[in-house]
Amino acid sequence: MLEAFSTFLFQTGFVLLPQNPQNLLMIAVGLGLISLAVIKEYEPLLLIPIGFGMIMGNIPFGGASPDDPEGVIHLLYYGVKHEIYPALIFLGLGAMTDFSAMLSQPRLIFLGAAAQVGIFATYWGALALGFSPQEAGAIGIIGGADGPTTIFITSALAPELLPAVAVAAYSYMALVPIIQPPIVRALTTRKERLIKMKPPREVGRTEKILFPIIGFIVCTLVAPKATTLLGMLFFGNLLKESGVTERLAVTARTAFIDSVTIILGICVGAGASADRFLRAESLKIFALGMLAFCVATATGVLFAKLMNRFSKDPINPIIGAAGVSAVPMAARVALTTAQKEDPTNFLIMHAMGPNVAGVIGSAVAAGVLLSILG
């Protein structure tokens, strides 16, 4: 009896964790992500599942690692490795997204495209740091500020980097309210930040129905490798805008996307076990991820300033920062940044234009990278 108790005792986490300080560190990181979500309310729907999954995956012999073939997480992780969850999330995202702000002002599409420069700038930066082209492509996509797209392309190009790349992408998405405002203020004058834009025109129902069909065909002809992601995004939007599949649209944008988000978050967190995550390249990935977000924000703002040189109707360059596809957080950050200068300046509908364009842009950029590197 005493021997059995002794065997049990030495197999508990209280004994094993002190012998594995790396796991303790990752548990602390998971607690940090949960704290950011609860205290600061930064992307709680993402950071709480990821943070808790990170704690689960770092309990020694807990069986919650994707590497444990007997564990439930190993089975659930199949959807991460084979890009199932990102595609399903894009279906729900499409059913949630209103493209009216972009359709009413098509010129704002260019701001969403400009922000994707962060992806390719980071790609070249990763190559310079010694990563392979496939690894550099996976790291570069962090600049799109789109977690599902990041997982989709990393699973295809560099699955060994998935824990670090996914955690970096979602962490920086949560930190958009901290990262973007200083860059916006540094690149704009107060006069520019005070610009009030004309109200957008009303978009008709026919336009809204035709857009997901035409948009899908055009985008996938440009980047066929993005067919799955874009197909799910535009299909979800068609469910929403058709007016005859409301039950399906409501399901896709509520219970369905919530369920997939929970599973994806837990799996991403559990995948960040100490042996997978605590590597020298992880620090490089986090540094490159920060570069990606900064470059994407800066290029969006600077391109808006460039457009103002040729536009009769001025654009507030703050909305250029919303070209990253962190929807709708980047648009909300643009609104709050503008209202610090003028509380009566409501930029949210204008900012949503480049914001939703950025969702499409990051998926197209992922398709281009897959075509070149896959």
Image (spheres, rainbow, N blue to C red):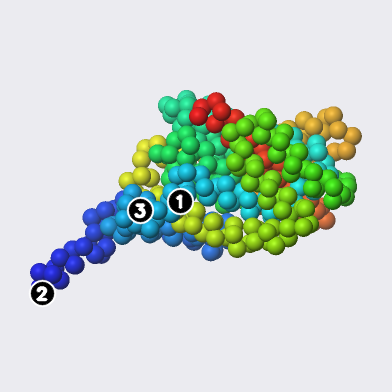
Q: Position of residue 82 (x, y in %)?
A: 47, 44
- Is the residue marked by circle 3 packed among few (<14), some (14-19), or many (20+) residues within 10 Å? many
Report helix, strand or loop for mark 1. Answer: helix
Q: Residue at x 54, y 60 (%)?
A: 259
**Can residue 91 be spotted in the picture?**
yes
> Between residues 96 and 34, which one lies in front from this camera angle?
96
Q: Position of residue 247 (x, y in %)?
A: 70, 62
Identify the residue under disc 1.
268
Give the amino acid type for the residue marked by disc 2 in the picture. Met
Q: Residue at x 10, y 74 (%)?
A: 1
Q: CA distance from mark 1 to mark 3?
A: 10 Å
Q: Going by the image, does 342 lie left or right of 258?
A: right
Give the amino acid type for the residue marked by disc 3 in the picture. Ser
Identify the residue under disc 2.
1
- Of callouts 2 and 3, which one flags the residue occurring earlier in the amino acid sequence? 2
- Of callouts 1 and 2, which one flags the residue occurring earlier in the amino acid sequence? 2
- Residue 217 found in image quarter: top right
**Can residue 335 be spotted in the picture?**
no
> Between residues 210 and 350, which one lies in front from this camera angle?
210
Q: CA distance from mark 1 to mark 2?
A: 40 Å
Q: Residue at x 53, y 64 (%)?
A: 38
Numbered circle sitting on residue 65: 3
Q: Residue at x 26, y 53 (%)?
A: 20
Q: Going by the image, does 257 lie left or right of 205?
A: left
- Residue 131 found in image quarter: top left
